Image (cartoon, rainbow, N blue to C red):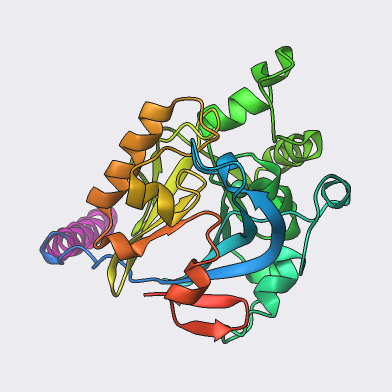
Amino acid sequence: MIAKSIASILIYLSAIAACAQTFATQTAATPPAATPVYEVFAIRYASIPDFPVNALISGADPARKFSIAMTIWLIRGNGRNILVDSGFYRPQFFKQFKVDGFIKPSDAVAQSGITPALKPEDITDVVITHMHWDHADGMDLFPNARIWLQKDEYTYYTGEAWQQPRTHGGIDPDDVLAAVKLNLAGRVSLINGDAQEILPGITCYIGGKHTFQSQFVGVNTRAGTVILASDNMYLYENLEKHVPIAQTLDAASNLRAQDRMKQLASSPRLIVPGHDPAVFEKFPKVSERVVRIE
Ligand SMILES: [Zn+2]
């Protein structure tokens, strides 16, 4: 009886082994899944009028001023709704700056005209390109989102940056606290350096030194690779005239980052600057404040 049971156990085990082998063979023979293709949108949630161009483009005529676009970017596909940057909403910024046509970034996403409509809880991920107030302040508006930040950016602005008076310009203490709280809640992923594919078809690149460790994002789309430069390239004029952004800790590194964007993007047309209102004229409109990058 015992021998019979042992025999049946052995048969059972060898059946499992055969099964596992078949599975392994099938897995090895299955080609790797194709890189997901995403849709990308630019959403304008505010404007800041009379902004001096020489604060954006190194060496520009101090008399030039214009209304800059305050923008977040939405990436959809592969079951995810990813924001690149999160805009601002806390009251202090409305005292410090003249802000036109503001919609809270979470409302700007909900009212974007992109279908199906997205509620704040539908956002799965928020990639923060850098900790400046106008990009990072809204990171706590999306209750289910994972926040992606460069590790060196997070470490520096939650620590050493505050040891000196001039090493945290544009960083708001409330945003630092928000980032720490999100990290304590287990919702922050720290990206460790350059060319990190954080999700299939979505890659973060460091460069530009707009802040201590600012990053930009490459996205696989039907049109090829789109580069969301954020403030590592403020305006199209930076790229066209090969001029560094005015606010950088390292102008040479910023130009190298811009050159690299040209290599990475499938076409220069697909490099999207951080604050240029021309973005909303160049691409097809989805609604008054939203264009589809394609
Ligand atoms: Zn900005």
Q: Is residue 176 above or below residue 285?
A: above
Residue 13, percent from left and from top: 23, 56
Among the 4 quarters of the image, the one containing residue 222 = bottom left
In the rendered image, is residue 143 in sight? Answer: no
Would residue 125 appear left or right of 15 to someone viewing this image? right
**Magenta region, mostly helix, strand or loop?**
helix
In the rendered image, is residue 41 in sight? Answer: yes
Quadrant of image for the N terminus:
bottom left
Q: Is residue 15 part of the magenta span, yes or no? A: yes
Viewer-proximal residue among 45 and 55: 55
- Residue at 49%, 75% in the rendered image: 281
Q: Which residues are magenta?
A: 1-27
Q: Is residue 271 above or below residue 293?
A: above
Viewer-proximal residue among 276 and 52: 52
Would residue 78 appear left or right of 31 to someone viewing this image? right
Viewer-proximal residue among 153 and 271: 271
Q: Is residue 36 part of the magenta span, yes or no? A: no
Q: Is residue 70 above or below residue 260?
A: below
Q: Exactly how many numbered labels are in the figure? A: 0
Residue 212, percent from left and from top: 54, 27
- Residue at 35%, 36% in the rendered image: 255
Residue 208, percent from left and from top: 43, 35
Quadrant of image for the C terminus:
bottom left
Viewer-proximal residue among 113 and 36: 113
Would residue 166 appear left or right of 217 to someone viewing this image? right
- Residue at 62%, 82% in the rendered image: 288
Residue 185, percent from left and from top: 72, 43
- Residue at 82%, 48% in the rendered image: 93
